[in-house]
Amino acid sequence: MSTTKSEDTRDAKASTPEKILPWVGLGARLLTGVVWVIAGGIKLSDLKQSVYAVNAYQILPTGLARVVGIGLPLLEVGVGVLLILGLATQAAGALSTVMQLAFIIGISAAWARGLSIDCGCFGGGGQLAAGQHPVYIWDILRDVGLLLCSALLVWRPRTKFSADQMIFTTK
Amino acid sequence: MAKRYDKKQEAARKMRLQQQREQKRKQFMVGGGILAVVVLIGAIVAVGLYLNQSYDINTPKAKHSQYGLSLGSSKGKVKLELYEDYMCPVCGQFMKGDPQNQVQGSEDIITKAAEEGWIDLTYHPLGLLDEHSTTDYSSRSASAAVCAADEGQDKFLAYTKTLYANQPEENGPGLTDGKLVSLGKTDDVGLGSKFKKCVDNDTYRGWVNQMTDHTTGKGITSTPTIVLNGKQLDNWSSFYDDFTKALKKAGYKVK
């Protein structure tokens, strides 16, 4: 009997952060998911503008920029919906991490080359008017925050109120 | 006895761990599968949207031949074909002139000859240089110009002059649709809300694209290209003299 008791205490000890993390994960999931859905949704409402925004980074050739300009908003909405539902959390979190990393690199590249553009993160985008100055650091900081949230979901995909939990938990 | 119990417990713990690992693996595979399905659906929708991006082909209300705007008068004795692109800096030089190199601008004499009915002018505003701006400025400005032509050749010619006067730099963002509209609404041009609607709806993007494809298909791939009385000029800088001569020869009082 004594051994069982000691095991219980071990479980209880281990579960202190394990109790909090699923709640933190829920927050990360909802925050990141909602941001993705909003950002992607705005872009979907004006795909022409989305393509121009990608063009403004002057990284991709025109044909590829067109593909990204149309494909990216869809991907954003898809990842966002998965995260909000908590479905395929780990995989969606991984893709979300990669996408944020790509954005951070893209914005940094624009900054380093002295381009004066709107990041087009939430629709809009393209060259800024004369006299307007880009503030890339805020875009980057926001994306770093979202990247950390996404990475957390890769590390600890078990979160509260998730579709994953409902599907996979065996009782 | 206690030892045996430990062993049993050890085995149970191992099994639980095994089960947990198994479940994690399953969850990972299924999660990856779900993500793959979502990405695939996104890709299919994206391809659909991509293919759907072609514009409707609306034929202009302005007088036009199959692939160009018909200006001047069909009774004009001098026949002129112009292929231009509002993004092309050399077209700007050709039309506005280049005082540094003592090149006479041609837009005034072309406008006069068209309005007097001396020439049978086919004007091709091409969308050739879309890759020289981040916003397809060539096609957008050309289709805006066709919108202007719908409201009369004087409007088209005045708008063309204004577009060249405000020509954006290459490889930049071009002018916005809003700017294209407000340039048309200036007193020099005098276009109104019908023009704005036409520009906002990308009305002639499809027609301009088709005209551009047709033109490059004929082997004309650079602008300005000028065909005077059926003969393509080797160099646009001789146009002013050649054109004046042709008008005089046809009996028109140029000066």
Image (cartoon, coloured by chain):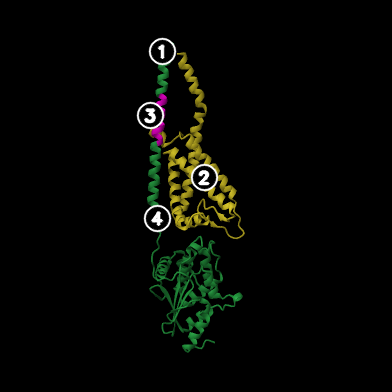
Which region shows up in magenta?
Answer: B16-28
- Mark 3: give few (<14), some (14-19) or many (20+) Cα within 10 Å: few
In this view, B105 is above or below A71? below
Q: Nearer the viewer, residue A152 or B183?
A: A152
Q: Is residue B189 visible?
A: no
Chain identifier for the yellow-coloured part of the image: A
- Per the image, the residue denoted by label 1 is B4
* Chain B colour as displayed: green
Q: Residue drawn at (53%, 79%), measured in percent from left and top?
A: B108
Disc 1/disc 4 C-alpha distance (Å): 67 Å
Which label sits on residue B49? 4
Marks 2 and 4: CB-CB under 8 Å? Answer: no
Mark 3: which amino acid? Thr
- Foreground: disc 3 or disc 1: 1
Mark 1: which amino acid? Arg
Disc 3/disc 4 C-alpha distance (Å): 41 Å
In this view, A121 is above or below B147? above
- Per the image, the residue denoted by label 2 is A101
